[in-house]
Amino acid sequence: MTAPLVDPFQRAIRYLRVSVTDRCDFRCVYCMAENMTFLPKKELLTLEELDRLCTAFVRLGVEKLRITGGEPLVRRDIMTFFERMGRHLDTGALKELTLTTNGSQLARFADRLHAAGVRRVNVSLDTLDADKFARVTRWGRLPQVLDGIRAAREAGLRVKINAVALRAFNEDELFTLTEWCAAHDMDLTWIEVMPMGDLGNEDRVGQYWALSDLRARLAERYTLIDTPERSGGPARYVRLQETGQRIGFITPLTHNFCESCNRVRLTCTGELYMCLGQEDMADLRAPLRNNPDSDAPLEAAIRAAIDRKPKGHDFDYSRQRADGQVSRHMSHTGG
């Protein structure tokens, strides 16, 4: 029996988020600079290497695998990776295979994702206004995303909408987004903007809308019922009595969610980040490539990394500064 992964604070690591590419067909203002320099393709793990790495984590007790990017569905031949990962669902070793996407490619791939064993997808969508959507994504087109959401639901995928709370941008759409999600039987999770990467002219503190304020505004119109439900990630949930829908809050700044963290993040270059809000990482590409016939060095490197997992992150917007900011972009770490 393989010993499970347990960090120094006795948290079992059951959840791996994997960035399969740093590339994206959008340039969201809180995620990327408009003129990004992407990694050379030779630095990226091949799909076969990603398979081997993820399989090692499943062998070590990871039960939930979330595929991210960049935009994961823009990677060439990515569906072969999803289809290969489906074998771990068949054995029962993996309990869930899912992804976070901007929705732009969902109309193309929804049926194949369902066939591969995916049952839930998170779609990032911050506004239902086409002009505002074009501004926040810089390159995006709202109708394409809405078509993707429709295709996903028709394919049998459960869709959850993730919206980043942005001051003076989507504050006025709080109820519009809530009602739209309720009408389409979709959960909605709000996320505080996190201080990651140089965005050029964008102001982190200026973007920040505290979810404590958002929740208070929701409570003016709806009855919020706290619920112990968890989806395996950092969100805390309420149910709206009037609609029955679930609303999630991911609050790394107003409420540190680290005490129950069971997650680590693997980048598309094989770097393992034990915490989204810390710079410390472990290189898994070297033991992977230097030992093609044995996974023992790779597993040893994974265990050594988990032994360094910190208790929590250092994000802080107090005193009007984005303290705890990390240098890499969100698209590099994988959301």
Image (cartoon, rainbow, N blue to C red):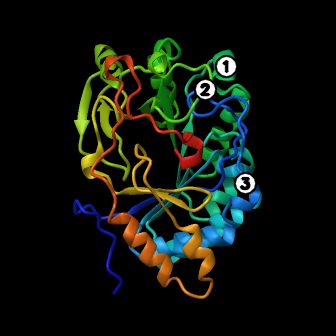
Q: Nearer the viewer, residue 66 or 321?
A: 321
Disc 3 residue type (three-letter): Arg
Residue 83 visible in the current orientation:
yes
Of labels 2 and 3, the one closer to you: 2
Quadrant showing the N terminus = bottom left
Disc 1 residue type (three-letter): Arg
Chain-order first, disc 3 or disc 1: 3
Return the x and y of residue 305 as percentages of the image width and height.
40, 65
Q: Nearer the viewer, residue 329 or 156?
A: 329
Q: Residue at x 59, y 47 (%)?
A: 332
Q: Residue beneath label 3, please?
A: 75
- Pointers 1 and 2 in contact (C-beta within 8 Å): yes
Q: Is 96 above or below relative to 327?
A: below
Chain-order first, disc 2 or disc 3: 2
Q: Residue beneath label 2, please?
A: 29
Q: Residue beneath label 1, please?
A: 135
Chain-order first, disc 1 or disc 2: 2
